[in-house]
Image (cartoon, rainbow, N blue to C red):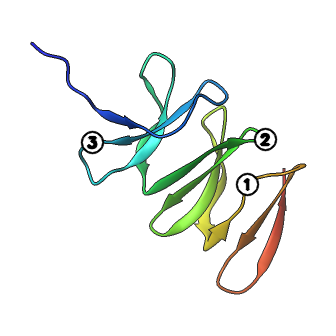
Amino acid sequence: MGWKLRFVFINTWVHYFLIVKTIENQDLYGFIDKYGNETIPLKYEYAICFRRNRAIIRLNIKFGYVDDTTKIVKDVQFDDATSFIKGKAKVRDLWAHKDLGV
């Protein structure tokens, strides 16, 4: 029985997580730990690496945030999102720009 490649490498290790995308299943993104276990499911259209313990995720063309404990901290609801810097991130929805605090 052979070994099967499941992921494509996306970025370097950050906060003990690695962003990967699947080989199959329409290139879905998620996070794995150093043992190859999925810590944040490979179900997102896109993911951006952790900055200030938060990572941006995209699902159904909307953005949200996940933290380094693998919890969703801001639901996937925004049209655009930036990384957290000094405890704040800028997001945009259909109606306005907003600043989010941690």
Left or right, 78 with respect to 25, comes to right
Residue 67, position in %: x, y?
Answer: 67, 40
What separation in Å lies between label 3 and label 2 (alpha carbons)? 29 Å
Q: Which residue corresponds to the image point at 64% horizontal and 31% vertical from the top-left? A: 14
Badge 2: residue crowd in 10 Å (few <14, some 14–19, many ≥20): some
In the depicted structure, whether residue 102 falls above or below residue 30: below
Direction left: furthest residue: 1
Amino acid carrying mark 2 in the image = Arg
Residue 5, position in %: x, y?
Answer: 25, 28
Amino acid carrying mark 1 in the image = Ser
Depth check: 66 or 46 in front?
Answer: 46
Q: Which residue corresponds to the image point at 28% horizontal and 54% vertical from the top-left? A: 26
Which structural element holds mark 3? loop
Badge 3: residue crowd in 10 Å (few <14, some 14–19, many ≥20): few
Find disc 3 in the rendering and name its residue: 23
Image mark for residue 83: 1
Residue 10, position in %: x, y?
Answer: 47, 40
What separation in Å lies between label 2 and label 1 (alpha carbons)? 8 Å
Quadrant of the image containing the N terminus: top left
Amino acid carrying mark 3 in the image = Ile
In the depicted structure, whether residue 6 falls above or below residue 73: above
Mark 2 touching mark 1, by CB under 8 A?
yes
Image mark for residue 67: none
Badge 1: residue crowd in 10 Å (few <14, some 14–19, many ≥20): many
Q: Which residue corresponds to the image point at 37% horizontal and 50% vertical from the top-left? A: 28
